[in-house]
Amino acid sequence: VMSTMSAAISDQMCDKATNGAKLHSEIPPELWCVTRRDLVELKLSVRRAVRDGAVVPTTRDNFDPSDRSVGPNLYTVVEQLIKPSTADTRASWALSRHPAGLPCDLFVTHAWAEGFYEFVNKLLASWPLGLQHAWIC
């Protein structure tokens, strides 16, 4: 089941030999950003993982796997998808996507209990024109 997630993200991961702690110490936090495309791709990966049973409801998040508008919450996505996909490097997902970092021009805060699909859809719909890289807390 995890192979679906690995296949979806592996081509975007930084080299497995890269030590995440070293990367985090060398790249300043203000460069730990993602792009709109990253979020679109992650949303598709989450949908596939839910479909394939790699992301499942829990007692903390009893989401409906057939729902395509709200989705699993951020706790679930991070625990069941992000952490396993970055475990080999221990780098953040943002630095796994962009090991050199990206200059931040948008700061995003959100509630971890909100649905992931809803969060991404609302963020993409409200993303200011001309801005390219988001730091998501």
Image (tube, rainbow, N blue to C red):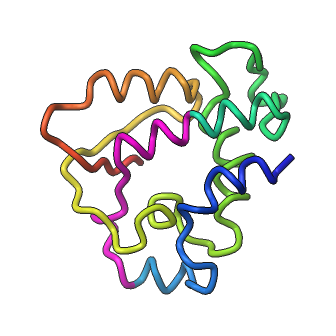
Q: Residue at x 66, y 30 (%)?
A: 47
Q: Is residue 30 above or below residue 47?
A: below
Q: Is residue 39 above or below residue 19?
A: above
Q: Position of residue 114 (x, y in %)?
A: 55, 25
Q: Position of residue 11 (x, y in %)?
A: 58, 62
Q: Is residue 105 above or below residue 127?
A: below
Instruction: From the viewer's side, name the closer residue of 136 and 88.
Output: 88
Q: Position of residue 98 (x, y in %)?
A: 41, 65
Instruction: From the viewer's side, name the closer residue of 56 and 129.
Output: 129
Does the stretch in magenta take in 31?
Answer: yes
Residue 17 is drawn in which quadrant? Answer: bottom right
Does the stretch in magenta take in 6?
Answer: no
Q: Position of residue 37 (x, y in %)?
A: 39, 42
Q: Residue at x 37, y 62 (%)?
A: 32
Please provide the residue range marked out in magenta.
Answer: 26-43
Q: Is residue 115 above or below residue 96?
A: above
Q: Residue at x 86, y 46 (%)?
A: 1
User: Dominant secondary structure of the magenta stretch?
Assistant: helix
Side of 65 where 9 appears, left or right: left
Q: Residue at x 68, y 57 (%)?
A: 83
Seen as rendered, the residue at the extreme left is 130
